[in-house]
Image (spheres, helix red, strand yellow):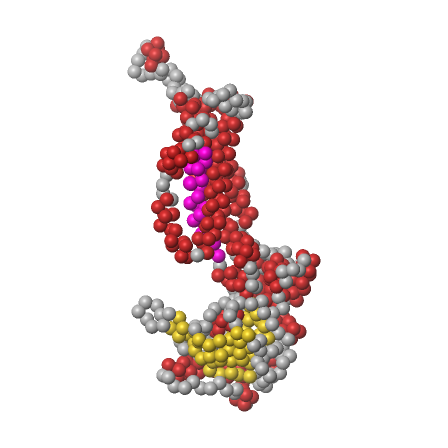
Amino acid sequence: MRLPTRIRAALGSLLLLVLFLAAWQLATLPGHDARSGDPEYAALLGARKSGLPAPAQIAEAAWAQLKSPFHDGGMNDKGIAIQLAWSLGRVLLGFALAALVAVPLGFFVGTSPVVHRALNPYVQLLKPISPLAWMPLALYTIKDSSVSSVFVISICSLWPMLLNTAHGVASVKREWLDVARTLEVSAARKAFLVVLPAAAPTILTGMRISMGIAWLVIVAAEMLVGGTGIGYFVWNEWNNLSLANVIFALLIIGLMGMLLDLGFATLGKLVAYQE
Amino acid sequence: MKPFVSVEQLGKVYPGARGEGPLCVFDAVSFTIHKGEFVCLIGHSGCGKSTILNIVAGLDAATSGRVLVDAAEVRGPSLDRGVVFQHHALLPWLSARKNVAFAVRSRWPRWSEEQVAPHAQKYLDLVHLTGSEQKKPAELSGGMKQRVGIARAFAIQPKMLLLDEPFGALDALTRGLIQDELLQICAATHQTVLMITHDVDEAILLADRILLMSNGPRAGIAEVVKNLLPRGRTRQTIHRDPQYYPLRNHLLDFLVTRSKRYRNGAANGAPRTTPHEPAQEAAQ
């Protein structure tokens, strides 16, 4: 009897995890340094203690962090939940601001081929600029590091949402628009009841891509400007040489990114339709 | 009696592709439809019959000529002219009932939900979709989708109905059922209808008059055939009428051979045969 695909896949995932942890544990075992038979000399070189923390040490660090996620011991000693909240807040704010601009603008661009062509060279020019490259300009004009990182998030979330909204609106089926015309539907009703639902899946895809990029960028932005956030936490723990905490933070970043993506995937399913 | 619809010297020219001259799809198309009349337009693909229907609907613009409906020139789409589209054109994110309700609300914006819902339901019942109102178009069969399209067009109580080959994608059995339903509703509402079809039998069953179009380019209405089979035609009995086969043969002969001849005549600049009513011919 063969187990269902889902169960076999889950068993496979579990097996990979066990193998990975075992290999990691082995690699970080305190080893004998081949270069010297003298244990004291080896200890001096730090050979008895591997540089990378073992899985158990990371679990320990994670437990220490998760025990008091909200503690606030000043500038460089904040709980992981507080740091995460800062990052999440910046991402959501920057993303929302970008959506406020990108969705209406994309709507407009999508309905007019002339506007689309007129704007296209600028979008193509601005889109490949690394969001962090905007940072000096943002810091100079805004003069506030926290607001600057929100701005950088906005800039990087803007393009996928703008392009996808424009594409979704431009590719609304002609016959649906014809139906609206023969029913003498007003412009506003047409926009909200025909074009928006028709383009919604494409717009949501743009939002999902934007959110993915924003979550990638926030870590780098916070490393750059410092102060608060999960990116700053990573940098700070690196300065403390606490690799266990760094690895723990990486896992948290990955988990959060996964949840955000899952959220948008769920939203996307809500507005999806089958032709 | 003044005709309800009057199509006058209609022509459509598309700008030519690279290196080619402009393409005249049809020109000098004129015909009339009286109130309560059911008229079918038959012709080969590419003769521009869908374009003519779209111009009457107001969705497309003619290069020359004009269309009068109820003594007013057509300048754009209107709720007075209900359209049943070739590919149903239902909004896929709305249920069958909401698709119809969307049209009803467009027609009567001030109606409350209590007025809209029963009105939409009435027309869904009319096309025998009772019980499937909550389904999305993707969950409906091709025939059911087209029924929703018909219900949507009738629900706004237009002054006339335009059908663009609505049954083209359906299997023969389903097509027959919906043709019967359409006949019943049209008879009950005295609807004025212009319908495009490929199907000769469908035209004989439904139409009071059949307009035959010659092949494009420069297509035109080559013949106007009056259906001498009396109204009240049904699918079960129509083929027993002695006039059925002569008429059918006449129409088929046109599509197979004569439609080409007219085109060549037009291409040579020869005067086009004036539309006639081959009543005797069909009755023989």
Rendering coords of residue B215 (x, y %) = 43, 77
Rendering coords of residue A239 (x, y %) = 40, 22
Q: Name the quadrant containing residue B256.
A: bottom left
Residue B265 in view of the camera? yes
Say left or right for A208 vs A45: right
Q: Which of B263 and A169 is in front in this view?
A: A169
In the rendered image, the vertical position of residue B12 relative to residue A152, given as above or below: below
Residue at 50% from the left image edge and 23% from the top image edge: A78
Rendering coords of residue B29 (x, y %) = 47, 79
Residue A170 falls inside the magenta stretch: yes
Task: Give the residues drawn in magenta, as a range.
Answer: A147-172
Say left or right for A139 vs B251: left
Residue at 48% from the left image edge and 61% from the top image edge: A174
Residue at 63% from the left image edge and 60% from the top image edge: B109
Instruction: Quadrant for the N terminus of chain B, please.
Output: bottom right
Magenta span: predominant SS is: helix
Instruction: Quadrant for the C terminus of chain B, please.
Output: bottom right
Residue B236 in view of the camera? no
Total count of labels: 0
